[in-house]
Image: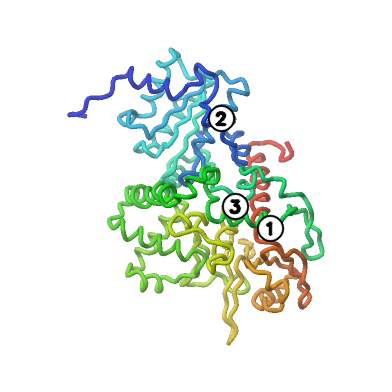
Amino acid sequence: MSGFNLIPEYKIIERLRYENPWWVSKEIPDTFRSMSKRLYFDLFYPFVLEKQVRRALVLMGPRRVGKTVMLYHSIQKLIDDRTNPQNIFFIGIDNPIYVHLGLEDILNLCKQSLNLSNLKNCYVFFDEIQYLKDWERHLKVIVDSFPDTKFIVSGSAAAALKWHSTESGAGRFTDFMLPPLTFQEYIHLKDMNHLIYNGQIPYGNDQIDYCLSTDYKTLNKEFIQYLNFGGYPEVVLSEKIQNDMGRYVKSDIVDKVLLRDLPSLYGIKDVQELNRFFTYIAYNTGNEFSYEGIAKDSGIQKETLKRYLNYLEAAFLIKVLNKVDINAKRLKRVTSFKVYLTNPSLRTALFSPVTEMDSEMGNMVETAILSQWMHRENLDLTYSRWKEGKHEGEVDLVLVDDKKYKPIWGVEIKWSNRYFEKPKELKSLIHFCQSNEFQSAVVTSIDQLGVKNIDYIALTFLPASIYAYNVGNITLKTKNSEYKSSLGQSPNQ
């Protein structure tokens, strides 16, 4: 580029040596060594090792969920598993030093830095790949050009990554989604697994294996902490960050996505309008919206609103839940829907922490529980709302069989013990069960556990905290078995 002095090669090689200290020390920096692994690490690492299929591994997810740390933990595990440390390269693409280089240029410099003639049996990690223009085209080329090298990339501009990796990398990329921390991972990171034991709960006519707690009072205290601060590993472990959520989380996660990533990806002109819209959605997480209602409240045109919702969902900031009627029939025109933050602590970052008795607790608990389910991308989750004559009803969470278009189960999410004492008040849920010939359903509570039988329907009451924990736990087990079968292993291995 005219007018620019390109950085000399030896300076870039110096940077590469600095970024890869294990070439000499045989271990990753202490900062990363001392961090606990996320439970998702055991799902991710087999894909790092996978070499039978010639594919790059693309680690996607929102900002600050621990993607870079997971790459470093993978590097350490490779070294522990006897991989030559000089066969492992890490390049942070967000460093301006690489700005004028393509991936192939960087790989040539990697070879020079260690006097290698080729990169056979090497592992190359590109962090924050979205900073490279047309990264997916570059990556596809090097996957083909270096058949004996494994490429692992990460990126946070989630919308671009998801879009490009599916559109352009067909057959060349494997996507791995790293979500915000589940409540199960939060308990694990805080070293509080002693609060949990393996038990059973009654559901319908069966006894189901289920994690239960030895101390619901302490578990609920942690659950509220999770609602406020739990989505991000570094926030969980740092009181300093918790005391300044606005600065750390809002500026690093919300502002960078809203003010920089999304506008540059989609050419959004009115950045402040998008910011105001997201703040409005975040404050009302878990509420039902209509395009007419939002347009009236915000003054934003309906078509623009639809685009904003798509952008925010693609960036993993929100999840839109669609409505079905009492028998899970989809409505011909989508007029109303619910919107949830992908993790409740985003709301704390924008406003203030909630306490146990706050009126917002119901919506925050619903947001937290839905955020555990979001990690199961292939489930058709909805909510049910209907009007029959004078009667209206709603069930918070309904799983639909997308082949038969029938509900599989319904869950009523409450942060209250009232319904354990007065289950007959759950008229909507009872009517929903009767209409679909269900003999059982789940209702969450603050700390009540047990079964109440109403009109031949067995309602299993579970503390919301333990329900959230189990959704995360079951999701991890399900993913483990799905991923193992996709890698050709037995799920029991």
- From the viewer's perspective, tell me whether residue 16 is left or right of residue 38: left
- Residue 197's disc is none
- From the viewer's perspective, tell me whether residue 163 is left or right of residue 365: left
Disc 3 marks a residue whose amino acid type is Arg
Upstream in sequence: badge 3 or badge 1: 1
Cα distance between the residues tagged 3 and 2: 29 Å
Of 451 and 233, the residue lying toward us: 233
The percent coordinates of residue 241 (x first, y second) are 47, 46
Task: Confirm or deny contact between disc 2 and disc 1 (CB under 8 A).
Answer: no
Task: Confirm or deny contact between disc 3 and disc 1 (CB under 8 A).
Answer: no
The quadrant of the picture occupied by the N terminus is top left
- Residue assigned mark 1: 217
Please name the residue shown 33% across and 28% down the image: 97
- From the viewer's perspective, tell me whether residue 109 is left or right of residue 287: left
The quadrant of the picture occupied by the C terminus is top right
Of 66 and 146, the residue lying toward us: 66
**Up-down relation of residue 315 to residue 298 (above or below):** above
Q: Quadrant of residue 309?
A: bottom left
The percent coordinates of residue 76 (x first, y second) are 57, 27
Task: Confirm or deny contact between disc 3 and disc 2 (CB under 8 A).
Answer: no
- Residue assigned mark 2: 33
- Residue assigned mark 3: 376
